[in-house]
Image (cartoon, rainbow, N blue to C red):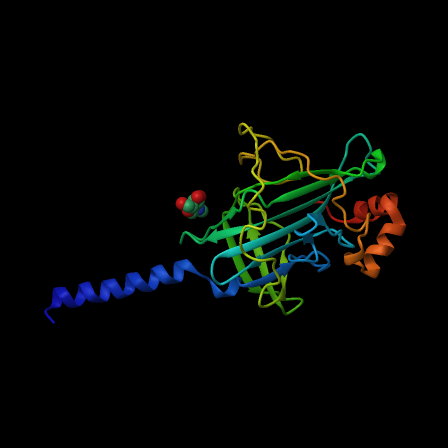
Amino acid sequence: MIPSIQSAFLLSVALATSLSSAQGDASLVGTWSTKSKKVVTGPGFYDPVNDRFIEPELAGISYSFTSDGYYEEAYYRAIANPTTPHCPSAIMQWQHGTYTLPGNGSLVLTPFGVDGRQLTSSPCSGDTGIYVRYEQAELMKSYQVITDPFHNVPRLNLFKFDGSPIQPMYLVATPPQMLPTQTLNPTSVASATGKSRVKRTDGGDGDHAQEPLQPLNQNAFTSRLPSKDSFNPDHWWWAGVGLTALGTVMYMMPTSV
Ligand SMILES: *[C@@H]1O[C@H](CO)[C@@H](O)[C@H](O)[C@H]1NC(C)=O
């Protein structure tokens, strides 16, 4: 080989190597959950067949990533309500879709639009909740997978578009525990007529466009209206304890998500 061809060859090998390393990160693969580990992606959080959420015992966040570019996320959080400070609202959010690593340290999450769901409930107002379609693309400015120095387990640190950290998550499952990584609800066509920019009040990314959403069915909490095929002692227990107790427990959870 003459030198210029040889260096071009080496350059192309180097380029191919850096491109392939930018496409995937094996250390991300798995299911991650915040400390209580009660919120975990997959069929235990969202039931796509009955189109319902299954209420976890405690607040938390979970993300899952596959090696071939799919992700799923589950959020269950309390939201302070200024008019009833002793009784915060609860919010559940679920999305899945694809992710990319553009090579600059960021993590870009693109949801399958029709599949995302959000349920907000205000225990003190006596409502069953507001159940809507939810679509929120996310840019994680950076991420880190480290070994947690205290728990000695893999830990995922995500940093939002503005660099602020999300609660640390710990590896709870490999391979990841997820619903099928394809559009689950392809026949639903959102009839939203336009995009409006709304500020999220739950600490999420305020700079993303959010579709106006339509209410879905009102029986979105599987645990409050248990169906025959969703029997689980935890759910029955929660159904019995009721909304007021839930509000009390959620109030004690950290809300700085
Ligand atoms: C990385 O690239 C993506 C996609 O081009 C971009 O949206 C993001 O802002 C970039 N991140 C940083 C930290 O520059």
Residue at 53% across, 34% down: 209
Q: Position of residue 228 (x, y in %)?
A: 80, 56
Whether residue 49 appears in this view of the structure is yes
Q: Position of residue 88 (x, y in %)?
A: 79, 39
Residue toward you, 171 or 131: 131
- Residue that sits furthest to the left in the current view: 2
In this rendering, position of residue 3 left or right of residue 148: left
Question: For the N terminus, which image quadrant?
Answer: bottom left
Q: Position of residue 235 (x, y in %)?
A: 82, 55
Residue at 48% across, 65% down: 26
Q: Image height check: is 84 above or below 144?
A: above
Q: Image height check: is 84 above or below 70?
A: above
Whether residue 257 appears in this view of the structure is no
Kindly indicate the quadrant of the structure image that contains residue 211.
top right
In this rendering, position of residue 90 left or right of residue 132: right
Q: Position of residue 127 (x, y in %)?
A: 81, 35
Q: Image height check: is 254 above or below 65?
A: above
Ligand 1 - quadrant of the structure image = top left
Residue toward you, 12 or 91: 91
Q: How many marks?
A: 0
Residue toward you, 159 or 172: 172
- Residue that sits furthest to the front in the current view: 187
